[in-house]
Image (cartoon, grey):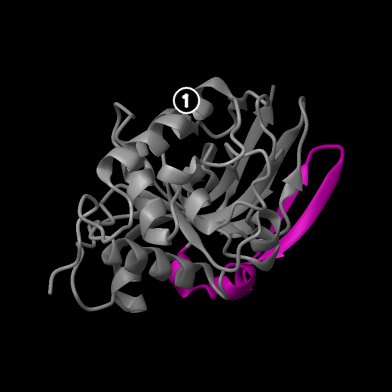
Amino acid sequence: MQNPSANDLSTGLSHAAATEASSLLHSAWTSGSVLEELPAGSRPATREDGYFIQSIFAKRSALPIHGWKIAATSVEGQRHIGVDGPMAGRILSERVVPDGGNIPFSPNRMAVAEVEFAFRMGNTLAPRDEPFVLDEVLDAVATVHAAIEVPDSRYVDFASVGAPQLIADNACGHFFVEGQATDTDWRDLDLSKHKASGKVEGRSEFQGVGSNVLGDPRLALLWLANELRMLGLPLEKGQIVTTGTCMAPLSVQPGDKVIADFGSLGKASVQFD
């Protein structure tokens, strides 16, 4: 049996209902407004419903997606948005900010920055029936990057709406910053033990480690590849995967500069206007 495509997921929502939900979320996303939750007739009841809405939401972008994000890969991240496991979302190209660039602070209700390991794919992993294993996923990686994700939600109380509605909301995707690819031979490193720091310049500094990301950021990448496989979607050459925060999210406010420092794996930074 073949994996389903993004257009024929087994969901309880009609295409019309999913389109209505994606329209409401896209309107909130572009205007900076918020929803209490999606209307009952277009509200996702399952993760599959959520991904169906997300796929329609993404088609509203005129650009190819930049890659994929994984939300809630750490205990802190799960607690922050009120879920008990990871979720996949698309990184939209129009919300990618150059390393060292600027992000408008408002509107942003979450008001956090997340320090993350990111992988750029060198080969495509096409969907198939059998699960991917770690070695073949890592063999498909080209480069590793320090990254900063700035999530947000289109819901008033994002910690209470549940995973299906958060997935529909692009898994809380907002802005993304990636550092330069590392020159370090990362394949010889145990990324589960690799440490990172996240600094809000002049205000606070947190420490993190790779094991906070589903036990190992490489395992988070494997999870994403298999989540897309189950959705009938490829993880494409050139796309980047950011694997979720490796420390408690950093609280930010207008004027802050955030620096993610992964030591030998490089840095990334962003300024909030």
Image check: 177 left or right of 65?
A: right
On the rendered image, what quadrant is the N terminus found in? bottom left
- Against 265, residue 131 (above or below) is below
- Can I make out residue 131 in this image? yes
Relative image position of residue 148 (x, y in whole percent): 59, 45
Image check: 133 left or right of 178?
A: left
Most extreme residue toward the front, as rendered?
41
Q: Amino acid at mark 1?
A: Ser
- Against 76, residue 216 (above or below) is below
- Against 133, residue 197 (above or below) is above
Relative image position of residue 207 (x, y in whole percent): 76, 60
Q: Residue at x 85, y 46 (%)?
A: 204
Q: Residue at x 45, y 57 (%)?
A: 45
Secondary structure under tag 1 reads helix
Image check: 165 left or right of 49?
A: right
Most extreme residue toward the right, as rendered?
203
Write down the quadrant of residue 123 in the picture.
bottom left
The total of numbered circles placed on residues is 1
Q: Residue at x 80, y 38 (%)?
A: 201
- Per the image, the residue denoted by label 1 is 27
Chain part drawn in magenta = 185-213
- Can I make out residue 182 in this image? no
Q: Is residue 212 found inside the magenta-colored segment of the image?
A: yes
Relative image position of residue 14 (x, y in whole percent): 28, 47
Relative image position of residue 224 (x, y in whole percent): 40, 63
Q: Nearer the viewer, residue 195 or 216?
A: 216
Write down the quadrant of residue 88 in the picture.
bottom left
